[in-house]
Amino acid sequence: MAVEPPVTAPSGDQTRIHNIGYRSYDGPRLGRAYARRSLYSQSLRGSYGLGRSVKSKVLPMLLFVVMCVPAAIMVAVAVATKAKELPVDYTRYAIIMQAVISLYVASQAPQSVSRDLRFKTVPLYFSRPIETADYVRAKCAALASALFVLTAAPLLVLYVGALLAKLDFTDQTEGFAQGLVSVALLSLLFAGIGLVIASVTPRRGFGIAAVIAVMTISYGAVSTLQAIADAQDSTGAVPWIGLFSPVTLIDGVQSAFLGAASTFPGGIGPSHGEGVVYVLVTLGLIAATYGLLIRRYRKVGL
């Protein structure tokens, strides 16, 4: 870069431009893996408002407390009354609290992706070594991990309380393990659905409303249709109707393979054969949401 001659300002002051050059970076280049881990940890912390304002912490922390308080009350009752078993099975707790879980997804999925879309920062991520798949993996893994913490924490409270109440260790450990499998599957499914819906719009308010609508309307419609089918003695249709809602999908999988009591009308859960269909549909939905997010962000990153 050539040095320009001094330029004399009208006031008589002199301004000079000096060629100081560009300094090359000789430090370590951490690459895609580091960028992916950083995006994951940042998104996971953001799901609970950590590292953000106090206002951002209120709702996720409140929902976390709401999830754990009923479990603590159940434990206190079981210990005080010397009950022989817990009031609620481990696999059923998340189904009972599905409204709180849906609200958490509705509040945190848009927070995870909508701001990047609104402020058009997604192309900046892709100008670095990170690729579209890395971004999607990090966001999906972060929200699924946050959901797993939300849903597994009350199960841990129940498990510790059951041991304090001196309930059978083997039965409680088996039930706790089944509950963890159930909420892990639920976390993956709900995170994928929430992020797909939230990625459609850069407006966080619209994303929240859309996620709530999909979660609540689908569950309400499926539950209503199942009740109608059961009332008309069409019990064979009840399990198949359950394929059309995320909540009833998880309910069907755990009642078919994890020994859980079904919450379907009449307690009619899917058989093992029907449960295989439930598993395939659930895994297919998880894979489909991942693929849709990849396609969405390839377009956004152009």
Image: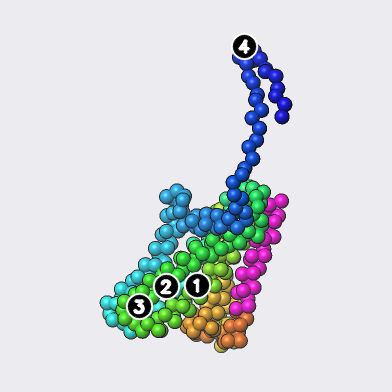
- Residue located at (41% from left, 59% from top): 62
Give the residue pinned by disc 3: 162
Give residue 272's quadrant in the image.
bottom right
Number of marks = 4
| CA–CA distance in space, label 3 to label 4 | 85 Å
Task: Say if the magenta span includes residue 154.
Answer: no
Residue that numbered label 1 is attached to: 183
Residue 259, given in percent of the width and then of the height, sits at 49, 84
Main SS class of the magenta portion in the image: helix
For label 1, count other residues whose C-alpha is less than 10 Å away and answer few (under 14), some (14-19) or many (20+).
many
Proximity of marks 4 and 1: CB atoms separated by less than 8 Å = no
The Cα atoms of the two marked residues, 2 and 3, are separated by 10 Å
Label 2 crowd bin: few (<14), some (14–19), many (20+), radius 10 Å: many
For mark 2, what is the residue?
155
Q: Nearer the viewer, mark 4 or mark 2?
A: 4
Query: Given the image, on which type of amino acid does mark 1 rest?
Result: Val
Callout 3 environment at 10 Å: few (<14), some (14 to 19), or many (20+)? many
Q: Amino acid at mark 4?
A: Gly
* Label 4 to label 1: alpha-carbon separation: 74 Å
* Tag 3 near tag 4, CB within 8 Å: no
Depth order, front residue of 239/141:
141
The tag earlier along the polypeptide, 1 or 2, is: 2
Image position of 22 with respect to 13: above or below? below
